[in-house]
Image (cartoon, grey):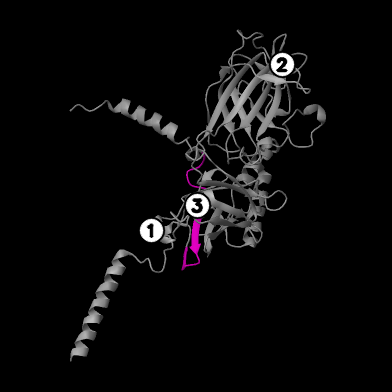
């Protein structure tokens, strides 16, 4: 039998893996789409409105926010922007009078901060790059800015689409496809009596891969139950222990953060902002055996005749991060019978028709929607009451624990299945056999004693 060409096999495997790692089975249609609508032509280019739509059910973009980049097809420049700004102007020395906003061939664009003057704002801009998850708050799952492009085409036929799009949200993990021309967007006027149309529209779709974002998981899961004294902790080094600085106490954390702040003094002023941003983004973790920034604990708390109750606690071990607008996703077959969630907001995640085994939890506005930094206030918790399904409900073999847990869109490291707390009368088979043998021996001895 002739073996296939090794090079071709490697290419096929690489293509398969690149697609697989960006696919989330719990949110199969989740993506971020950037839509460019050309609203008018100018003497040397066009004015476009760029809309960033987050179609991911439970993955948001947190502070310091998104950064969008691309490569111009020709020698285009950005004359002006509203609702966003390019991070660098670049070399505009060939322009004598009016200077463009950016002359870089590969611009990087960021959102403006809240509170900028009204003449620099458009709708859905200026949130510091923060974009909510679509399942959590659809109205805040969008961002937008306006861009005036020069030295470009001035008709549908002469415009060259930008290429090599990138998206940081705020870190790596997103891969963007090529720009594709689509039917022009239709807009409805404020009085809903007239429709207008963009002169040209193209879309760019970006998908997320946790494997590209981080070498290790960013959260872990631990279990406990009322029917077993065993607490199943997060696995040792579940999020990796390599080259991680940790603090044993809150005093240590303040000392380490102070030391990192002093080291930034040696950085040149022009680069100090980026250096401080990188330092603040680098986690400073509380010393634990798992070394994860976040731990999710699922405790099977109570058993009633028709209901059962679980307590979910999310703990932050990062001294440098507050998780604002956090999300938690759990997959369990009994989540289709949720009766009440006591301290979180809840929405079902139904990705496959009638299969309703996944729940999205997030904090209540102005109550616990912010998971504070590591410390005495660095946790949020709620209890979930579920109605039993007589045909499936059991406490045996770890059934009461979730199959998957996601925090802020990243899948958490689960404990191994053989370590789950089991019922006291559900001993392993080897133990049961030994017990039976011991009972038989004791019974035979007792009979012999009676007959003596």
SS at mark 3? helix
Locate the N terminus and report the quarter of the image it occupies: top left
Residue 77 is covered by the magenta coloring: no
Q: Residues within 10 Å of mark 3 (few under 14, many from 20)?
A: some
In this view, the residue in front, 180 or 344, is: 344
SS at mark 2? strand
Task: Write down the residue under mark 2.
Answer: 196
Q: Which of the two marks, 1 or 3, is nearer to us in this view?
A: 3
Q: Which mark is residue 418?
A: 1
Tell me where residue 426 sits by quadrant: bottom left
Q: Residues within 10 Å of mark 1 (few under 14, many from 20)?
A: few
In this view, the residue in front, 93 or 157, is: 157
Distance in Å between CA atoms under marks 1 and 2: 61 Å
Tell me where residue 140 sits by quadrant: top right
In this view, the residue in front, 160 or 74, is: 160
| Residue 154 place in picture, x, y as percent | 67, 9
Distance in Å between CA atoms under marks 2 and 3: 48 Å
| Residue 297 place in picture, x, y as percent | 53, 58
| Residue 204 place in picture, x, y as percent | 57, 24
Task: Write down the residue under mark 3.
Answer: 334
Residue 227 is covered by the magenta coloring: yes
């Amino acid at each position: 039998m002739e073996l296939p060409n090794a090079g071709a096999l490697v290419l096929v495997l690489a293509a398969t893996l690149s697609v697989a790692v960006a696919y989330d089975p719990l949110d199969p249609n989740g993506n971020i789409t950037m839509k460019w609508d050309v609203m008018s032509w100018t003497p040397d280019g066009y004015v476009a409105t760029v809309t960033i739509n987050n179609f991911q059910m439970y993955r948001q973009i947190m502070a310091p926010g998104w950064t969008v980049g691309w490569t111009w097809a020709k020698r285009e420049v950005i004359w002006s922007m509203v609702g966003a700004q390019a991070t660098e102007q670049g070399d505009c020395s060939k322009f004598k009078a009016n200077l463009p906003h950016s002359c870089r061939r590969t611009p990087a664009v960021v959102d403006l901060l809240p509170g900028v003057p009204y003449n620099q704002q458009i709708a859905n801009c200026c949130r510091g790059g923060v974009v909510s998850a679509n399942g959590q708050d659809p109205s805040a799952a969008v961002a937008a800015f306006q861009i005036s492009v020069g030295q470009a085409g001035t008709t549908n036929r002469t415009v060259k689409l930008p290429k090599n799009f990138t998206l940081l949200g705020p870190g790596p993990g997103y891969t963007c496809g090529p720009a594709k021309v689509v039917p022009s967007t239709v807009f409805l006027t404020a009085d809903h009596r007239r429709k207008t149309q963009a002169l040209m529209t193209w879309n760019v779709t970006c998908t997320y891969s946790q494997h590209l974002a981080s070498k290790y998981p960013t959260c872990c899961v631990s279990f406990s139950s009322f029917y077993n004294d065993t607490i199943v902790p997060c696995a040792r080094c579940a999020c990796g222990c390599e080259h991680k600085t940790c603090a044993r106490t809150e005093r240590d954390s303040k000392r380490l953060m102070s030391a990192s702040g002093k080291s930034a003094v040696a950085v040149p002023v022009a680069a100090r902002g980026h250096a401080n941003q990188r330092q603040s983004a680098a986690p400073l973790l509380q010393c634990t055996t798992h070394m994860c920034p976040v731990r999710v604990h699922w405790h099977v708390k109570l058993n009633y005749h028709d209901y059962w109750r679980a307590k979910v606690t999310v703990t932050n071990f990062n001294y440098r991060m507050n998780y604002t607008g956090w999300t938690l996703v759990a997959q369990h077959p009994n989540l289709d019978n949720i009766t009440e969630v006591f301290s979180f907001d809840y929405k079902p995640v139904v990705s496959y028709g009638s299969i309703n085994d996944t729940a999205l939890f997030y904090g209540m506005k102005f109550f616990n929607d912010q998971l504070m930094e590591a410390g005495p206030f660095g946790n949020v918790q709620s209890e979930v009451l579920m109605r039993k399904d007589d045909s499936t409900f059991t406490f045996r073999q770890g059934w009461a624990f979730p199959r998957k847990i996601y925090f802020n869109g990243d899948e958490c490291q689960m404990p191994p299945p053989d370590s789950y707390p089991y019922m006291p009368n559900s001993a392993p088979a080897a133990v049961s056999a030994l017990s039976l043998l011991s009972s038989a021996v004791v019974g035979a001895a007792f009979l012999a004693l009676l007959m003596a």
